[in-house]
């Protein structure tokens, strides 16, 4: 079992390095095309990107089983919202990896009759829904932390003998809205909420990295499914950023969002 865990971790690290290189090639190919590089050089970059993509698929052959195991563990979480979001996300990841395995079989020649376009669309749909669940989980955790921050600030103000009104937010960032009308108060409250959000994310780096990684990854299936055409440059940049953030969580495990 320990040997399998080590092998899985090593494969995951290699896959993320290949992913970063693949999206770097995508970004480089887009830049070369815009600057009028030679067709031969562009072709070589596209071929390298294709080889890296196929190599990643090979490294992910066992990921469906890992995702199912993660889903089984998430079922036992006590928080209902986290249990739902994390379990559904892992189940969709398992289906995404299964479709990816079929694509690998088709591209490697083991199953030449596979309709690669159809299976690619299926895989990106599962990938998209998994990311939506991940972002929903992030939003829920942000909301809980903001409520905790607000409650903690209210308690501190009561202990210090300072009255807390509805217009004051954590950190003493504001006061009750001016009597000049409803709009200034709404603007002030919105500004205070943004500052509170920034404080929460700054105080919880794993959550901040998870939000950034999922937000960057979201552009990839949106573009591939034709729901929001971003272009190869944006897809390459977002994929490269999310890959670097994923590698960072491997180098520094404390930056990985738990559970």
Image (cartoon, rainbow, N blue to C red):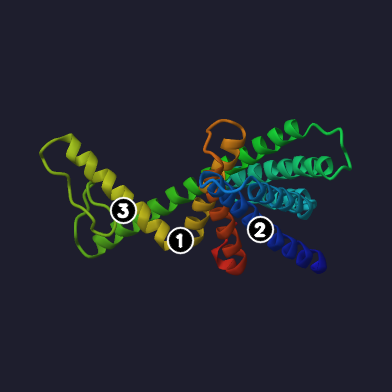
First along the sequence among labels 2 and 1? 2
Along the line of sight, the residue nearer the viewer: 116 or 179: 116
Residue with the mark numbered 2: 16
Side of 213 relative to 185 (left or right): right
Counting from the top left corner in percent of width and height, residue 222 is at 57, 36
Q: Residues within 10 Å of mark 2 (few under 14, many from 20)?
A: many
First along the sequence among labels 1 and 3? 3
Q: Residues within 10 Å of mark 3 (few under 14, many from 20)?
A: some
Specify the quadrant that holds the N terminus: bottom right
Side of 233 relative to 88 (left or right): left
Counting from the top left corner in percent of width and height, residue 250 is at 62, 65
Element assignment for label 3: helix
Disc 1 to disc 3, C-alpha distance: 14 Å
Number of numbered discs visible in the structure rendering: 3
Disc 3 to disc 2, C-alpha distance: 33 Å
Along the line of sight, the residue nearer the viewer: 78 or 132: 132
Hey, which quadrant is residue 123 in on the image?
top right
Counting from the top left corner in percent of width and height, residue 12 is at 71, 60
Q: Residues within 10 Å of mark 1 (few under 14, many from 20)?
A: some
Q: Are marks 3 and 2 in contact (CB under 8 Å)?
A: no
Residue with the mark numbered 3: 195
């Amino acid at each position: 079992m320990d040997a399998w865990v080590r092998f899985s971790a090593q494969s995951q690290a290699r896959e993320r390095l290949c992913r970063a290189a693949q999206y770097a090639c995508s970004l480089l190919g887009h830049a070369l095309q815009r600057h009028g590089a030679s067709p031969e050089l562009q072709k070589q970059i596209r071929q390298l990107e294709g080889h890296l993509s196929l190599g990643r698929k090979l490294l992910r052959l066992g990921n469906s089983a890992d995702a199912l195991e993660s889903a089984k563990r998430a079922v036992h979480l006590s928080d209902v919202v986290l249990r739902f979001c994390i379990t559904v996300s892992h189940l969709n990841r398992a289906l995404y990896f299964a479709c990816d395995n079929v694509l690998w079989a088709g591209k490697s020649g083991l199953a030449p009759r596979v309709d690669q376009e159809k299976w690619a669309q299926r895989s990106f749909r599962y990938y998209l829904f998994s990311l939506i669940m991940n972002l929903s989980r992030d939003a829920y955790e942000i909301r809980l932390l903001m409520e905790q921050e607000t409650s903690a600030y209210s308690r501190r103000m009561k202990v210090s003998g300072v009255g807390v009104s509805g217009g004051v937010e954590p950190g003493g960032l504001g006061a009750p809205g001016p009597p000049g009308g409803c709009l200034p108060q709404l603007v002030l409250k919105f500004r205070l909420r943004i500052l509170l959000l920034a404080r929460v994310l700054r105080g919880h780096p794993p959550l901040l990295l998870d939000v950034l990684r999922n937000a960057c990854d979201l552009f990839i299936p949106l573009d591939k499914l034709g729901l929001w055409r971003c272009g190869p440059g944006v897809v390459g940049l977002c994929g490269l950023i999310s890959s670097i953030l994923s590698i960072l969580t491997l180098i520094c495990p404390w930056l990985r969002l738990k559970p």
